[in-house]
Image: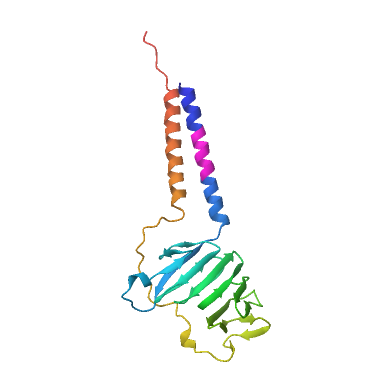
Amino acid sequence: MKPFIHRFISFTLFIVILLLSSQFSLAQNKLLGNLTVIKNGSSTNRAENSVIVNGERAVNGSSIMSPSEIITTAPMSAKISLPKTGDVLLSWGSKMNLSFVNSSISGELLTGSVTIKSEPNTTLSLFTTEGTITFPVQNQVNSVFVSVENGKTIVNALQGQVKFNNILVSAGESYPGNIDNTAIPDSNTQITESDSDELNPYFLTGIVAALAGVVLIVLTVSSNDDNSTVSPIR
């Protein structure tokens, strides 16, 4: 019976290690954004105090996958931090389809406004009804504020350079004409406390690792029992 138990434990340990390896591989290959919900004022209607990601209410610390549809309702803004790519700050009253990989940010701004700050060597392709916003020079930090109101697109280069269709806009410039800089969201506004008990995306990995340790201990103890000898009574 004991050889059967050993084989069963060994097989279980193999499966656990395989699952653990798969979880780590997935975490390394898939870039996830981290959501911060920012409160820009007060509201008596709790239902309005939300950020909607792919049709569901999201809170601080939620993981954002690519692609995602993000909607902000007054008075909430949403900051999506991309560890290897940059930051996307979506103002309240906005709707955006966002996609990203390790070296690229793309998407479509349907309504509202967004501020995008990229890490060096990151490309941008942001679409509006009037055209496409890109970073012509990637080997630097670039930052742009884009607003869509009544179908009209306003572009303000905050750092580096951006290109709106074939029009180059340098830092401190906007197209068309000048815009009110006070409309640009402040990333230092109050951050609301999370009221979610959502699991961390790596929680499953921790459970699998703990299970692997337990199985390994059981296997070791069982092996020690088999190796023990009892002297015959003479």
What is the magenta range? 11-19
Find the residue positioned furthest to the front.
150
Picture coordinates of residue 177, whole percent (x, y) = 58, 91
> Residue placed at 42% from the left, 19% from the top?
229
Q: State the residue in front, 38 or 132.
A: 132
User: Which image quadrant: the C terminus?
Assistant: top left
> Residue placed at 40% from the left, 17% from the top?
230
The answer to whether residue 36 is left or right of residue 125 is: left
> Residue placed at 52% from the left, 49% from the top?
23
The answer to whether residue 12 is left or right of residue 75 is: right
Q: State the residue in front, 178 or 94.
A: 94
Q: Is residue 147 above or below residue 216?
A: below
Picture coordinates of residue 147, whole percent (x, y) = 53, 81
Picture coordinates of residue 71, whole percent (x, y) = 47, 71
Magenta region, main secondary structure: helix
User: Which image quadrant: the N terminus?
Assistant: top left
**Would residue 82 be seen by someone viewing this image from the given angle?**
no
Residue 15 belongs to the span the image colors magenta: yes
**Would residue 163 be seen by someone viewing this image from the given angle?**
yes
Picture coordinates of residue 197, whole percent (x, y) = 36, 58
